[in-house]
Amino acid sequence: MEKIIKLNQIDDSVKQIKNQCQTIVLVGGCFDILHYGHLKFLEKAKKDGDILIVALESDEKIKKLKGEDRPIHSQKQRAEMLTALRVVDFVICLPLMKSDQDYLELVKKVKPDVIAVTAGDPKLKNKKEQAKAISAKVKIVTPRLKTLSTQEIISHLKISSDRRCF
C-alpha cells in the first residue's frame, strides 16, 4: 500500500487497516520545516495506536494561515519527508480545506480511534466535536513548544543572516 494517499483513496486504505483490527491515530498539520518538536509529537502520537496517519495541509491553506512566503516546502516534499520517518505510516495530502465541515468529513472517512494534538491547539474544541461524532478520543500528547516552531526557526535564520558581515 502506498504511504502517501489522496483524500479519495482513504476509504480503501482505512478498510484494510480496520480489517486487521489495528487502531488508527490521526494527526494534522503543516509540517513545513520538519524539526525536533514535530518528531517528538509524532513519536508520542504513534504510541497511542498501531497506525499513525498524518493529514497534511495543502500549500494553499498554509499560505492563507502563515503568509505569502510560506510554505517553504511543497506539499509533495513535506509528504515525502514525513513518510521517511519510521513512525509515520501514511500521509493524506489534503486539498484546500475551507471549513470545519471539511475536516469533519475527513475524520469520518479516516475513522481514527485517537486524534492526537499538542497542548493549546487552537482547534481543540472542533477536534473534540469531530472525535465525539465518530466515538473517538482526543489525546494531548505533547506541550506546545514555542521555541521549536517553524516560525521561530525561520525568524532565527533571518536574524542570523542579517548579522553576517561580508
Image: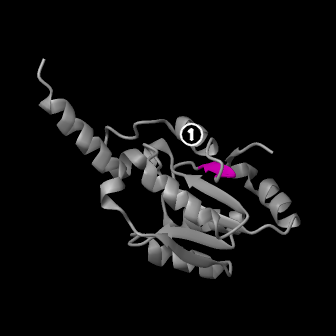
* Residue at figure coordinates x 41%, y 48% from the top left: 62
The C terminus lies in quadrant: top left
* Residue at figure coordinates x 45%, y 36% from the top left: 73
Q: Position of residue 127 (x, y in %)?
A: 52, 73
* Residue at figure coordinates x 38%, y 66% from the top left: 144
Q: Position of residue 3 (x, y in %)?
A: 71, 45
The rendered magenta stretch, by its main secondary structure, is classed as strand
Give the colour scheme shown. one colour
- The outermost residue toward the right is 19
Categorize mark 1 by other alpha carbons within 10 Å: few (<14), some (14-19), many (20+): some
**Residue 134: quadrant of the picture:** bottom right
* Residues shaded magenta: 88-93
Up/down of 130 relative to 55, above or below: below
Of residues 48 and 133, the one drawn nearer to the viewer in this rendering: 48
Of residues 161 and 121, the one drawn nearer to the viewer in this rendering: 161
Q: Position of residue 24 (x, y in %)?
A: 71, 66
Q: Position of residue 81 (x, y in %)?
A: 56, 39
Q: Is residue 90 magenta?
A: yes
- Reading the image, the residue beneath label 1 is 81
The N terminus lies in quadrant: top right
In this rendering, does residue 29 appear at all?
Answer: no
Q: Is residue 105 magenta?
A: no
Of residues 46 and 12, the one drawn nearer to the viewer in this rendering: 46
Q: Secondary structure at mark 1?
A: helix
In this rendering, does residue 142 appear at all?
Answer: yes
Q: Amino acid at mark 1?
A: Met
Please count the marks in the image: 1
* Residue at figure coordinates x 82%, y 66% from the top left: 18
- The outermost residue toward the top is 166
